[in-house]
Amino acid sequence: TREAPAESAMRFVAGSHRGRRLKAPAGNAVRPTRDRIREALFNLLAHNRWHGAPLPRDAAVVDGFAGTGALGFEALSRGAAHVSFLENDPAALDLLRHNAALFSDSAERIAILNCDATRPGRARRACRLALLDPPYGSGLAKAALEALARGGWLKPGALAVVELAAKEPVVDPPPGFEALDERRYGATRLIILRWPGL
């Protein structure tokens, strides 16, 4: 069994919870997206030229391989209408539930689902934004994108952001997805794709 790592803290970068602390484990068992990269990503989404509207404001969002929920909770802080967190690691689920308490006044905007992001089942609501942060080197992003599309998680024209290691090989997008952009931030690479229909 994997020993639960010691906890550290991260902060919300912007929005209604800016500056508040988010619990995250120390070590590499769960690897939250760093503050600087989250800030760059959400600034990119707020001014994106691909969707026709700023994201994540007023959008339903799915956070796959959620871990601590750093990406999804940042989306909530920035005005997302709802976030579904997909995670199946018990320690990460405990942290997700702890961090969700920061949004106790918006509990109806949060769904924490104990499931594998590559097998999420049918969606309860279609989303305009998918945030995927699979373990580096796992090759799970493509399977997760396919499963989200198949399960009705993505609205027509939805954007999907995949976080990878900068040196990790990029697989071809699954059928139907259009690769829009790629950004590198140190050891991290962000791939932005669009599900068709917009």
Image: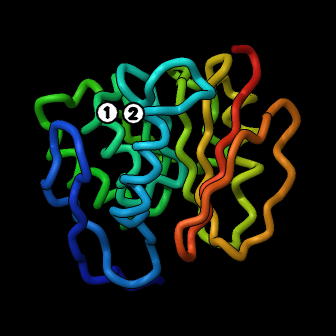
From the top left corner, tell me how far across and down residue 98 is, in percent: 21, 55
Residue neighbourhood size for the residue with mark 1, other residues' Cα within 10 Å, grouped as few (<14), some (14–19), many (≥20): some
| For residue 177, above or below residue 173 | above
> Which residue has dot 2 on it?
83
Quadrant (top left, top right, bottom left, bottom right) of the C terminus = top right
The dot on residue 145 is none
> Which residue has dot 1 on it?
110
From the top left corner, tell me how far across and down residue 30 is, in percent: 44, 71
Question: Could you tell me how far apart the alpha carbons at marks 1 and 2 are, in whole angstroms?
Answer: 5 Å
Looking at the picture, the colour scheme in use is rainbow
Q: Residue at x 46, y 78 (%)?
A: 29
- Secondary structure at badge 2 equals strand
Q: Residue at x 76, y 50 (%)?
A: 142
Q: Earlier in the sequence, mark 1 or mark 2?
A: 2
Going by the numbered disc 1, the residue's amino acid type is: Ile
From the top left corner, tell me how far across and down residue 176 is, in percent: 84, 30
Residue neighbourhood size for the residue with mark 2, other residues' Cα within 10 Å, grouped as few (<14), some (14–19), many (≥20): many
Q: Residue at x 46, y 49 (%)?
A: 41
Going by the numbered disc 2, the residue's amino acid type is: Val
